[in-house]
Amino acid sequence: MSAGVPMRRRLLVEYLRATVGVRDERVLDAIAAVPREVFVPPSLFPQAYEDYPLEIGDGQTISQPSVVARMLELAAVGERERVLEIGAGSGYQAAVLARLARFVFSVERLPRLAEGARTRLAQLGFRNVSIQVMDGTLGWRAQAPFDVIIVAAAAPAIPQALKEQLVEGGRLVIPVGDLRRQELHLLVRRSEYFEQSVHGPVTFVPLVGKAGYPNGVSSS
């Protein structure tokens, strides 16, 4: 690891605090503790701490740090809570979540990405993350309910299965929209109804699955 990497990570955190406006110090501390360069292809190491998404193969990306921070701040993850992540990707967001939550259950539809994420997380010593290959639009019913669900891909509509797998007071953070225009939604479960708010435009790859986009849909 380059001697400059810790400094670049600190600069990223200061950028998230001062420019993006992230105020949750637990989120900032978690991002400061996770080496993002481990989760990107070697050719992209120099860009690991820039604030934009990076390609990780199979048409997927690692989300830009400011979007990860915004989503985690909205989710308000507690240290004793159980989190479901939809879209493990490289494993980066799961690593950050693992520093915030008691346990992280992560779903990934692409076996190669799931295996890579498991390897990286194990190498970094994370023991409170489980990754399975399955249709994320259906959630993970065997492990439900969850305090928090975070979706790292854009859905055409909010999957009913995810709403049903939240505890009372649970939070669901999900990008919703078509392949050109998406907005970040926060849902909070209040018994049998949901408080819903919208938190600005985002850009994600499509959420593929039974309650999402069909396989083969391109994000371009």
Image (cartoon, rainbow, N blue to C red):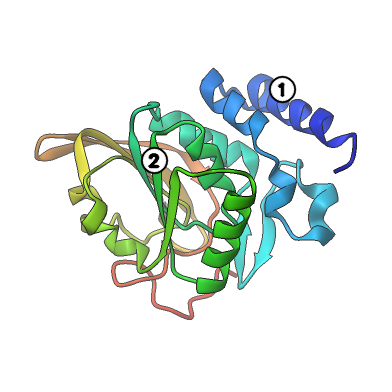
User: Is 28 above or below relative to 144?
Assistant: above
Instruction: Specify whether 34 is left or right of 163.
Output: right
The C terminus sits in image quarter: bottom right
User: Which residue does the numbered mark 1 point to in the structure image?
Assistant: 14
Q: Residue at x 65, y 31 (%)?
A: 33
In the rendered structure, which amino acid carries the disc numbered 2? Phe
Is 192 left or right of 40, judged from the image as shown?
Answer: left
Looking at the picture, does residue 130 appear above or below residue 10? below
Where is residue 25? Give x, y as percent: 55, 18
Q: Residue at x 31, y 58 (%)?
A: 157
Q: Label 2: how many residues lie within 10 Å, few (<14), some (14-19) or many (20+)?
A: many
Q: Residue at x 25, y 52 (%)?
A: 143
Say which amino acid is labelled 1.
Answer: Glu
Visible residue check, residue 203:
yes
Q: Residue 153 appears at what percent x and percent y?
A: 47, 57
Tell me the element at label 2.
strand
Picture layout, residue 104 above or below residue 21: below
The residue beneath circle 2 is: 103
Residues 183 and 93: in front is 93
Q: Position of residue 79 (x, y in %)?
A: 40, 26
